[in-house]
Amino acid sequence: MRLDRFLANLPHCSHRQARLLLASGRTSVNGATVYDGTQDVRVFDRIELDGQLLQAGKPARFFMLNKPAGCVSATADPRNSTVLDLLHEPDKEELHIAGRLDFNTTGLMIITNDGLWSRRLTQPQSLLGKTYLVETEAPIDPNCVDRFAQGLYFRFENLTTLPAELELLGSHQARLTLHEGRYHQVKRMFGHFNNKVTALHRERMGPLLLDDTLAHGHYRSLTTEEIKQI
């Protein structure tokens, strides 16, 4: 919410008083004096008034996980193990998944408690590529390279996919970069050519590359530099 609204929600503080507090430089956010009441503040921000703490600020948490097959991309599931079951962290119920993967799809998954940050990573408007290593049942038609780059029409949604980059690595293997996340999109794109995807592994999300030292089912915290890249 806006800082002036945050202050106005305090006991015995009106909207007018909030504006006066800001104008007099008595309010700070994360150690910096703030005069602009329209500045957005979140649960992660430390807010002080005259040096007195109003909100301590909750630590933002960011994890990179190498998702194994046979694991549900959900925070809870009554029948199957979930990606959160793989994390040995306190207050896991506060975390959410940034970009889900199918049950048997493996690879890079980001888990965080920062919804604004995760939306920047995953929303199509950001145009951040998601790169997958794909294996198929039949040889990959070389025409897929141009067709994927042009976009494929999905009748169910009545839309054409955004241009995607396909790099052929072998007769049955390719690297595919998407800039959106439609339902079962990779499988449906290859299915357009009557070719079944037999294995799918996400390697990259935007600038975030899966750590090649991270074994299946293992995770680590993102570095400060990785977080700033989004």
Image (cartoon, grey):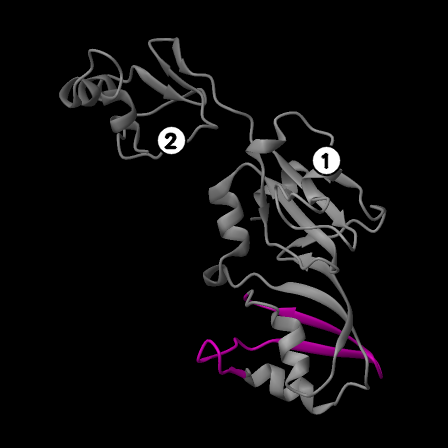
Q: Which residues are magenta?
A: 153-180
Looking at the rendered image, the quarter that the N terminus falls into is: top left
Compare residues 65 and 34 and report the one nearer the observer: 65
Is residue 73 in the magenta section? no
Q: Residue 106 occupies which quadrant of the picture? A: bottom right
Is residue 174 in the magenta section? yes
- In the rendered image of this protein, does residue 49 appear above or below residue 9? above
**Residue count near mark 1 (Cα–Cα under 10 Å), binned few <14, some 14–19, many ≥20:** some
Q: Which residue is mark 2?
A: 41
Q: Position of residue 220 (x, y in %)?
A: 74, 38
Q: Residue 54 occupies which quadrant of the picture? A: top left
Question: Residue at left 37%, top 20%?
Answer: 28
2 vs 1, front mark: 1
Residue type pointed to by label 2: Val
Q: Position of residue 46 (x, y in %)?
A: 45, 21
Query: What is the spatial separation of the Cα atoms under label 2 and label 1, in whole angstroms?
Result: 28 Å
Secondary structure under the numbered disc 2 in the rendered image? loop
- In the rendered image of this protein, does residue 44 appear above or below residue 218? above
Secondary structure under the numbered disc 1 in the rendered image? loop
In the image, is 150 to the left or to the right of 23? right
Q: Which residue is mark 1?
A: 87
Question: Residue at left 68%, top 39%?
Answer: 84
**Residue count near mark 2 (Cα–Cα under 10 Å), binned few <14, some 14–19, many ≥20:** some
Residue type pointed to by label 1: Leu
